[in-house]
Amino acid sequence: MSAARAAADARSTRRLRKRLMLGGWAMAASLIVGQLLILRHLNGLSQASAGTSAEIVVPSDAWRLSGTFLPLLLIGAVLILQICWLRGSWAALSVLGIFLLFPISLLCMYVAGVGGPTALGAARLSDGQRFILAIEPVMTDSVYTLYEEADWLGLTWRQVSWLDYSEDGRFTGGEHLAVSPDEHWLLVARAGIWTDCFRLEGGRPVRIADQPAPLWTQADYEAEMRLRSARIATLTGMRP
């Protein structure tokens, strides 16, 4: 009787292990496929919005990294379980999979990191609305964009406005957002000066049209940028 019970327990254990392994693979596959479908949808919306006033929504850097890391973590966990629970060629293949997973994971995380905008700073209003200053994945220069969170988890960002960018790498470093105490102004600072100014109207940022950016090809470009910062400071009463 005890031998029969032991055999039944062994079969139950094997079934449980099989379910855990298959469940892990199914969860990893679901995360990958589900996120690809969502990203494809967002990409389609962005392409349809190009050159129009429609909203452009992109995945946040946190989502890109965590969404890549979690399936890889699940795959690694399942491979380790297979090494522990399986025998023969299945165990050997799982060991090979672990060795291959490490460089693949590094490559995937790198692609996720550089595959979209990266947050440089953020500012939150009293009502919880959060704006993000991000740098775009452009290799030739530092291109900045202002976003806002498009969902309550902050997994997606909605584009608010393109910002003036740094030609030839000038006025970079120390990038951050600032909100005035009365929440009437949203300002962008880089390299110790104000570079962009928005008036907050009902929580919506409206670019100040009377603060045009000087042309970077002008000989007095840097001096004009500092004068522009001074005009923004006078207008808002804030110092960078």
Image: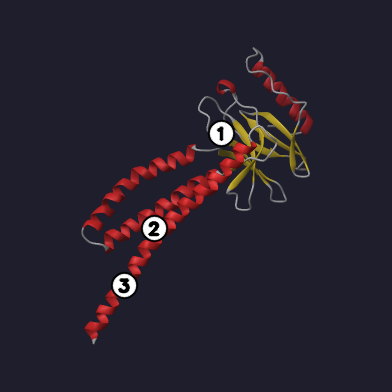
Give the mark toward the camera: 1 or 3: 3
In the displayed structure, 221 sits above or below 24; it is: above
Check disc 2 and report the residue beneath it. Answer: 25
Marks 1 & 3, CB-CB < 8 Å contact: no
First in sequence: mark 2 or mark 3?
3
Structural distance between the alpha carbons of marks 1 and 3: 50 Å
Structural distance between the alpha carbons of marks 1 and 2: 34 Å
Residue type beneath disc 3: Thr
Is residue 45 or residue 176 the one in the foreground? 45
Structural distance between the alpha carbons of marks 2 and 3: 18 Å
Identity of the residue drawn at 56% across and 41% down: 43
Q: Secondary structure at mark 3?
A: helix
Q: Secondary structure at mark 2?
A: helix
First in sequence: mark 1 or mark 3?
3
In the displayed structure, 6 sits above or below 150; it is: below
Which residue is most to the top? 219
Q: Which percent across, then down, holds residue 133?
A: 62, 37
Report whether 194 appears left or right of 86.
right
Residue type beneath disc 1: Glu
Marks 2 & 3, CB-CB < 8 Å contact: no
Check disc 1 and report the residue beneath it. Answer: 136
Say few, some or many: other residues with alpha carbon within 10 Å of mark 1 (under 14 / 14 to 19 / 20 or more): some
Check disc 3 and report the residue beneath it. Answer: 13
Q: Secondary structure at mark 1?
A: loop
In the displayed structure, 231 sits above or below 60; it is: above
Report whether 229 appears left or right of 10.
right
Numbered label tally: 3
Q: Quadrant of residue 160?
A: top right
Say few, some or many: other residues with alpha carbon within 10 Å of mark 3 (under 14 / 14 to 19 / 20 or more): few
Give the mark toward the camera: 1 or 2: 2
Q: Which percent across, then down, holds residue 56?
A: 63, 40
In the displayed structure, 42 sits above or below 217; it is: below
